[in-house]
Image (tube, helix red, strand yellow):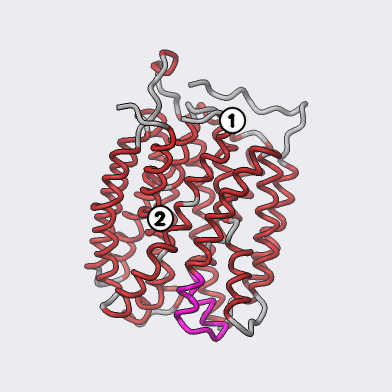
Amino acid sequence: MRLPRIVIVVMSAATVVITSISMNAFSLFLTPIEATFDWSRATATIPYVFAMLGWAIGGVLFGKKADDLGTRPVILGGVLLMAAGFFGMGLSQNLWQLSLTFGIMTGMAKGACGLVIISLLVAKHYDAKSRGLAVSIVQTASPLSPFFLAYPLHYIIVNYDWRMAAMFCGILLLGVAFPFGWIGARDPAPSSSSQREAASWSSCLPYLRDRSMLLLFAARFSCGMALFQSVHLVGIAASKDFDPVVGATAVSVFGVAAAVSAVAFGWLSDRYGRHQALALTYIFRGLGTLAMSADFSNPLTFYIVVALAMGPTFGTIGVQNVMFFEMVGPRLAGLIMGLSFLVHQVGSAGGPFLAGVYFDVYGSYDGFLQIMSLILLASAALVYIAIRSDDAPLPEPARP
């Protein structure tokens, strides 16, 4: 069955809203898990560290599978694996079980049914003139996940417990995400030129030696590190003497701001250039993160700073995904995007853990936020440096 492109985009976005719950909602699980097991903040983030590493490995493995087999079986299998991970999380009784179920299982599943593979799916359906906007519309789904789901999860955690909330996530994945994925996860009809042999792993090596590609990978690492803000957002709000409701509201503010900025930066990248729009996202995030280290007298100011510091996150990810797709072509895009997310997720694993260690030692996140702001601003400079000159072109993209 051939579906209109807009239906592909809508169904894909609906799938991502649910599958993104695995990472975006962990800040709601963090303090209840810490209290249940009487762990330190750093120890309680270890399952998330494993999830980031699992996402990194899954992104590469499933990215290559998507290049070879198409995105549909990869996405649907990922949803099933993630549901199993959440059901296992609800039954976990110790650290290694949480690290296996929430960490490795949901993390690897995220590499199969998260933004990388679904961005690849949507990018295949659009040409360069509208690809940035189309992919960015899908990026809005991930930040909208906490907007739709943060309060229901918070309600279940407060009135029941975090285990019941984990079970609820598994049910959503099976009952909502899988049907949406079944309808919308459809690759374009293959052309005769796409019937040839799958690209080998070594096909990506010329691209990985390119200076521009390496600089963009370095910038993507800092993007991953900065995601500690989403994991610790409720904790950051508490460190500013706000109550848990302000923290939960901040998670939703982040979702709305990220959705708006994803579309805005996708449109800007189509109109004014990918590198320029990407660098701008890092500048906003760096300045906002610096402002987040200040003291706040009221929640409204805190929400505004959260929107500035964290809102452009999915604009960054969306524009980068389009850039990698266009640099290497559809035949290698899944693998290269997966490798870029391997770098991203190493940062995503280290950032939350280091922030937890910093908080345990100093009782505040402010110093770590200031360091992170400098890293993000440096990444904006790296993106500008990565703009290629005519005398140093990338290898020709792999054709479909």
Find numbered disc 1 in the image and state the secondary structure of the residue it sits on.
Answer: helix
Q: Position of residue 346 (x, y in %)?
A: 51, 54
Compared to residue 152, the image places residue 243 above or below, namely below
Q: Label 2 is placed on what type of residue?
A: Ser
Question: Relative to residue 295, is residue 103 drawn left or right?
Answer: left
Nearest the viewer among 301 and 98 is 301
Q: Magenta segment, which residues?
A: 231-250
Locate residue 253, reporting x and y percent: 52, 67
Task: Please tell me whether residue 233 belongs to the stretch shown in magenta.
Answer: yes
Is mark 1 in CB contact (under 8 Å) with mark 2? no
- Left or right of 176: which side holds 310? right
Position of residue 247 relative to residue 217, above or below, is: below
Give the x, y percent position of residue 28. Answer: 40, 71
- Residue drawn at 58 percent across, 31 percent down: 326
Residue corresponding to mark 2? 20
Q: CA distance from mark 1 to mark 2?
A: 26 Å
What amino acid does circle 1 point to?
Ala
Q: Taken as a whole, is the magenta stretch helix, strand or loop? A: helix
The N terminus sits in image quarter: top left
If you read the primary sequence from the N terminus, does the residue marked by circle 1 or circle 2 appear first? 2
> Disc 2 on helix, strand or loop?
loop
- In front: label 1 or label 2: 1
The residue depicted at 66 percent of the width and 44 percent of the height is: 268
In the image, is 137 to the left or to the right of 214? Answer: left
The residue located at (34%, 69%) in the rendering is 152
Q: Which residue is mark 1?
A: 128
Q: Can you give x and y, in whole percent of width and height, for residue 123 in the image? A: 49, 34
